[in-house]
């Protein structure tokens, strides 16, 4: 069950069907006469009663089959990228999914629901509207229900970040420990221990698809963490005094070194490149 969410669904499906058949067995057993009442009589099945029992069993089996059909995937696909690779994919019903560097997503469509589990990295979604089959994005502890929209989801070790370019999404925690949050165009949210809501410029949502990340008055520590996603070696701040310095700028994710080269011209810092590729950012 831990290795794949579909295993849990299959287990729940057969548990449900088995419990329904147990109820049918109890009904049949209850229709048998008490042994004390048949000591001197011959008991025989009432044909209509027997037909009712078979009809009940048939109904249970049909319900079980319908339930099985609803939880049985009709489409499955795994999408993944490595470092310095982006990927765009069009799903069977017309929705579009783009993956950023080093990302991993699993797509599963059912007859009555569409799901994407974002296991790692970042993805941009452009969802085809389908009232009969809602679209869900599962990311760590968050469930994102799509209400017809274009939006970006990023999974980091600390949190899940969602930003909306158009339409609406509803974000909720899987444990239902807080009220769902509705986001519309220009809204963004960060989910860690709780929801934090903020606004975002439309041009910033999914800008990585054009090879850019746009920073607007963000702390240097957060910016360098983002820049580090696009390098093979880490970036280290030499002192915490620099961490809260705010900065605005544009990162070319295909060449993050240009951003690091420009940094000393914007802030009072020095860039030291070590032999192993690690970058150390120090005070001037």
Image (tube, rainbow, N blue to C red):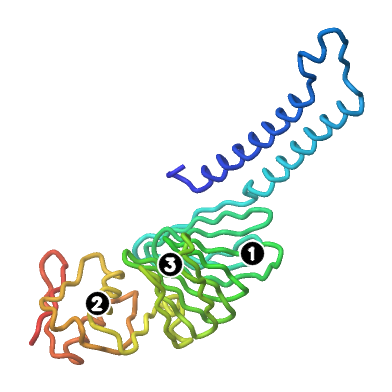
Question: In percent of the image, x 53 and y 67: which residue is there?
Answer: 97
Q: Which residue is mark 2?
A: 224
Q: Position of residue 11 (x, y in %)?
A: 55, 39
Foreground: 193 or 224? 193
Residue that carries the numbered disc 1 in the rendered image = 134
* Left or right: 259 as drawn, with respect to 124: left
Mark 2 or 1, which is nearer the eye? 1
Query: What residue is pinned by disc 3?
Result: 86
Q: How much space separates mark 2 and mark 3, taking CA atoms?
A: 21 Å
The answer to which image quadrant residue 130 occupies is: bottom right
Instruction: Tell me the crowding category of disc 1: few under 14, some 14 to 19, or many 20 or more residues within 10 angstroms, Cα based.
Output: some
Q: Considering only order in the chain, which callout, 1 or 3, is on the residue closer to the N terminus?
A: 3
Q: Residues within 10 Å of mark 2 (few under 14, many from 20)?
A: some
Is 66 drawn above or below residue 102 in the view shown?
A: above
278 vs 5, left or right, is left
Image marks 3 and 1: residues in contact by CB distance under 8 Å: no
Residue at the image position 26 percent from the left and 69 percent from the top: 231
Q: State which mark lies toward you, 2 or 3.
A: 2
């Amino acid at each position: 069950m831990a290795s794949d969410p579909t295993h849990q669904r299959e287990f729940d499906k057969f548990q449900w069907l088995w419990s329904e058949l147990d109820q049918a067995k109890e009904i049949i057993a209850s229709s048998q006469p008490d042994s004390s009442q048949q000591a001197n009589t011959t008991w025989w099945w009432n044909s209509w009663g027997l037909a009712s029992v078979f009809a009940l069993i048939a109904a249970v089996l049909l319900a079980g089959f319908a339930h099985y059909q609803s939880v049985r995937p009709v489409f499955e696909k795994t999408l993944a990228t490595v470092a310095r690779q982006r990927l765009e994919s069009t799903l069977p019903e017309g929705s579009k999914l783009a993956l950023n560097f080093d990302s991993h997503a699993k797509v599963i469509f059912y007859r009555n629901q569409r799901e994407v589990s974002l296991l790692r990295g970042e993805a941009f979604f452009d969802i085809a509207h389908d009232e009969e089959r809602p679209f869900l994005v599962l990311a760590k502890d968050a469930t994102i229900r799509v209400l017809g929209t274009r939006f970006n989801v990023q999974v980091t070790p600390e949190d899940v970040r969602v930003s909306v370019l158009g339409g609406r999404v509803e974000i909720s925690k899987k444990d239902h420990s807080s009220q769902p949050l509705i986001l519309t165009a220009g809204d963004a949210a960060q989910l860690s221990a709780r929801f934090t809501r903020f606004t975002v410029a439309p041009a910033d949502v999914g800008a990585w698809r054009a090879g850019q990340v746009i920073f607007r008055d963000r702390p240097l520590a957060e910016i360098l963490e983002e820049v580090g996603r696009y390098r093979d070696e880490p970036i280290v701040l030499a002192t915490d005094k620099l961490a809260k310095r705010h900065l605005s700028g544009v990162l070319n994710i295909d060449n993050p070194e240009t951003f690091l080269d420009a940094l000393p011209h914007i802030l009072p810092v020095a860039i030291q490149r070590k032999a192993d590729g690690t970058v150390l950012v120090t005070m001037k």
